[in-house]
Image (cartoon, grey):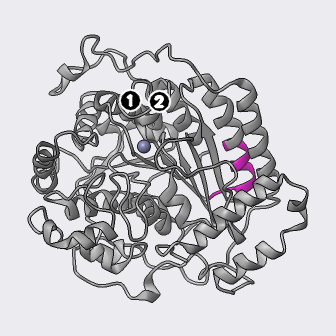
Amino acid sequence: MIRFHCKEAGEALGTNFILCCCSSSSSPNLEDLVLVDFDNWAMETGGHPMKPHRIRMTHALLAHYGLLQHMHVLKPNPAREKDLCRFHADDYVSFLKSITPETQQDQLRQLKRFNVGEDCPVFDGLYPFCQTYAGGSVGGSVKLNHGHCDIAINWAGGLHHAKKCEASGFCYVNDIVLAILELLKVHERVLYVDIDIHHGDGVEEAFYTTDRVMTVSFHKFGDYFPGTGDIRDIGYGKGKYYSLNVPLDDGIDDESYQSLFKPIMGKVMEVFRPGAVVLQCGADSLSGDRLGCFNLSIKGHAECVKYMRSFNVPLLLLGGGGYTIRNVARCWCYETGVALGIELDDKMPQHEYYEYFGPDYTLHVAASNMENKNSWHLLEDIRAKLLDYLSKLQHAPSVQFQERPPDADLQEVDDDQVGEDERWDPESDMDIDDQRPLPSRVKTEFLEPEAKDVGDNMKEDEHNREAEQAFSGSSCLKV
Ligand SMILES: [Zn+2]
């Protein structure tokens, strides 16, 4: 573990910072293990838009802007099999561990079953890649739990689409769910905020029925991957109103985005009062992203970091999507500066990837003149609807802790299998008064809708029922 002691910036603010560094020149073993394989993989899969190289570019910018000296930089311990199995199914994790490009042709059924192969290709070093980025996020949570820092950052994490037993959208293991589970050992309530252009479906699904984790996702909705994240999807059972979705259309700009983000997140912080916040900073919501269609500037995107930081609640910053890699590096470098309270010079320092940033060689890039399809009327409707949901949360739920569970130590890699009883169950540590299995509860809700729902739009009820039915029927469901 490599540490650089926190310098004046952090101390002056009374804030400590940790960068969980999954791509560091100060961790040569890790480079050998993962980054060389990244290069091979990038060559073999050529056209795949997810380029792990962007993490290395981000790190180079952080180093040359002099930001590393203001943080503790940690080389994360890889997540062990049993750590991954706190959320993921044992057979899925075993599969990730064993599959190689050479053996994949013999395991076509398994590939299909776990959705590995196309969007989520098999490559050399896949399993250590998963262990590393998950270890960074969980390690950040451990540091926050101990009060060793106030803000922890893992730009290699934030892979929000992975499901309990299924890869999705280049996400193999869900480091965010694992990090939140770690935070829940200490904090009664954890807030998850997702500003990637894609819906944070894997995290939402994992915590859909609990009131201890609130998820809020801002994303493009309508004929767009992964297709979920309707404004009417609000959580289920005890988790009702604890999953929020903000569906947006093409071309949203900084002003429109913040006209939703600040009032909604301000209200969430007021009513939910989380003990820790996890912010997924997917950079595919930036203007000019290769796969995205939003029109946010880096400053507009970073305004979300600035705003969430202003609440002085322990904060875990994670990466996510981002496919115009020079802009991803720019964004996460600038956001590291925002976390540190350091405003960075727009003129970029010379460094090994300098040529990527021509012709201007600046940190910021202008947003485009693309049409903003989000009318003020539409934005007002969305804001009103979400604030209405939030008004139904009268008080922050609490949970009795009997004994603090041990930390994920992540000290050594071993092959321990997790027992079924060790896997997290959202209902096991909550004061749930209704322990009936989910399907019967779903049925009860269908037959006896709550009085306050009766007058609501019938279409909406129908949608919610369909969504709940789909949710309860999923074979990969955690609960
Ligand atoms: Zn994305």
Most frequent secondary structure within the magenta stretch: helix
Pointer 2 local density, CA inside 10 Å: few below 14, some 14–19, many at least 20: some
Please state the extent of the stretch shown in magenta in the rendering: 265-274
Image location of residue 407, percent across then percent down: 41, 73
Image quarter for ligand 1: top left
**Is disc 2 placed on a helix, strand or loop?**
loop
Which of the two residues, 161 or 312, is positioned nearer the viewer here?
161
Please tell me whether residue 443 belongs to the stretch shown in magenta: no
Side of 403 where 374 appears, left or right: right
Q: What is the three-letter code of the residue carrying label 2?
A: Cys
Quadrant of the image containing the C terminus: bottom right
The image quadrant of residue 61 is: top left
Image quarter hosting the N terminus? bottom left
Q: Is residue 346 left or right of residue 238?
A: left
- Residue 353 percent coordinates (x, y): 18, 27
Residue 293's label in the rendered image is 2
Splitting the image into 4 quarters, where does residue 68 fall?
top left
Above-or-below relation of 300 to 179: above
| Relative height, residue 56 to residue 400 (above, below) | above
The residue where tag 1 is placed is: 289
